Image (tube, rainbow, N blue to C red):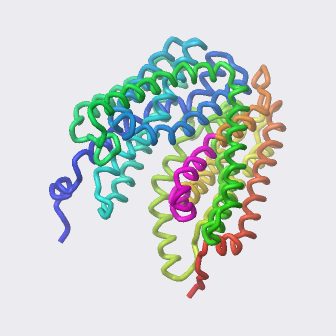
Amino acid sequence: MSLSFSARLAAIPPGAGVLFFIQIFATLGFAVLYSSLVLYATGHLKFSAEKATLIMGVFGAFNYGLHLFGGYLGGRFLSNRNLFVGGMVLQLLGCATMTAGTTEALLWGLALFLTGSGLNVTCLNMMLTQRFAPEDNRREAAFLWNYAGMNIGFFVGFTVAGHYQLTQRYTELFWFATLGNAVAIVLALFYWRVLADINTPLLQASRREFLLRLAVGMAILLGLVPLLWFLLQNPQGTEYLVKAVSAGVALALVVLTLRHKDLAERKRMWAYLILTLGSLMFWSLYQMAPSGLQLFAVGNVKLELWGVTIAPQWVQNINTVVIVLGGPLLAAWFARLRERGWPVDVPQQFAASLLLMGLGFLVLPLGIALADGQGKVAFSWLFTSYVLQALGELLISPVGYAMIGRLAPRQYQGVMMGSWMLVTGLASLFAADFSGSVAQPEGGSALVSNPAYASLFTQLGLGSVLVGVLLIVLVPRLRRLIGEPKQEPV
């Protein structure tokens, strides 16, 4: 007999339900900046496309790169709920600062916002996972709901951002983001007691140790703001710094792999490194959505459907809808394939995601070739590109973090998880490099920039397809490295 609705509500651990709603409002500010930063920088502040996309690349690099640091601070120096609320306060101050509408306000606003968003994302996930015992099988459903809440936040954020974009009302847009952050803070404070940390190192500390760690945590939280502001002053130098650090981490991982004594674990570490390179290719193209692809959409695509003008940020919702609707369908399809004995594994999913990403970029030159007399590309081509990219994300994103638990030796799991996060940040910088390579003409003529876009999209699309084909060739080898058993279709 199925449980009644009230019984199901009673079965939800205290705090898990409110975290779903907190996730929605906590996502709004990031959705606004993610979808509007390049357009605001080029349209309102008159940045060049190259400078605007570079700022967007650094934005992504810091946001993803600080997640690991936030995971270390939460529960050790500050409780997860303290760090989350503190981060949300910084996000609120950042969005409010940007309402001033100046370049200096943007840089300080980004420094405040990135410190908050970079450190507190992991805390929300930790607060959720602590609501469940290790053997509680409700955890997976809770994270699916949490993921749904995040996508609701993205959908609302992208939709509202597009509404204000059509009238260039950026001040009101940033106030909307500020309000979203405020609601998340109010919800967290109202349910403060039920969001308390459970079984963290900080809870074992004495009163004196607790206060000392609290002081250190607050100092780090506040000290990061001027540091990020300083680095944002010179995004080009910051880009080189992040790339150099990433190269050093990659070299260290290779050396670590070569020196690892356990043969089976060493093989899985090699598989991790190979798949990480594929992931870097995928995310470097994927993260062109809020920068290069958005500039292309504004200047070279006929953003109109059935007589309705389409705001650039609304295009981002194609991805959101495909993921929400396609995720369960894809999971069910894979389950049926595996029941029948067809091998659907990580190497195959990575290869397919790169092929889909490549096809998503290759349809754009075809659309450019069929553009109208003013050089404007039909919206259907951009729509098709985003659908293909979203399908690729469904194949690679959910398995990425789970893959690390399978491939990383226990003593290296923290390092390899951090490296995986660093790849996403590094990909933001490569996406900025690609996005800034097409000069935007003064008159905004699509006919002038179309050839450069066609060449760029063709090269990137073919590159992704080539890496995807290479992974297909390597599938048998990767299976042997991972230790996957052979499966035969029945």
Asked whether 325 or 92 is in front, the reply is 92
Asked whether 357 or 377 is in front, the reply is 357
428 to the left or right of 36: right
Asked whether 238 or 429 is in front, the reply is 238
Which residue is pictured at 55% across the width and 51% down the height?
A: 417
Residue 487 locus on image (x, y percent): 59, 82
In the image, residue 410 lies in the stretch drawn in magenta: yes
Asked whether 253 or 298 is in front, the reply is 253
Residue 349 locus on image (x, y percent): 61, 64
Residue 44 sits in which quadrant?
Answer: top right
Question: How many labels were placed on the picture?
Answer: 0
Quarter placement of the C terminus = bottom right
On screen, residue 448 above or below 422: above
Quarter placement of the N terminus = bottom left
Residue 112 locus on image (x, y percent): 49, 22
Which residue is pictured at 39% across the width and 46% down the height?
A: 125
State the predominant SS element of the stretch in magenta: helix
Which residue is pictured at 58% across the width and 33% down the height?
A: 62
Which residue is pictured at 29% across the width and 34% down the height?
A: 188
Residue 356 locus on image (x, y percent): 66, 57
User: In this picture, which residue range is highlighted in magenta?
Assistant: 400-425
In the image, residue 126 lies in the stretch drawn in magenta: no
Can residue 352 be seen by looking at this rendering? no
On screen, residue 433 above or below 274: above
Q: Residue extending furthest bottom?
A: 490
Can residue 423 be seen by looking at this rendering? yes
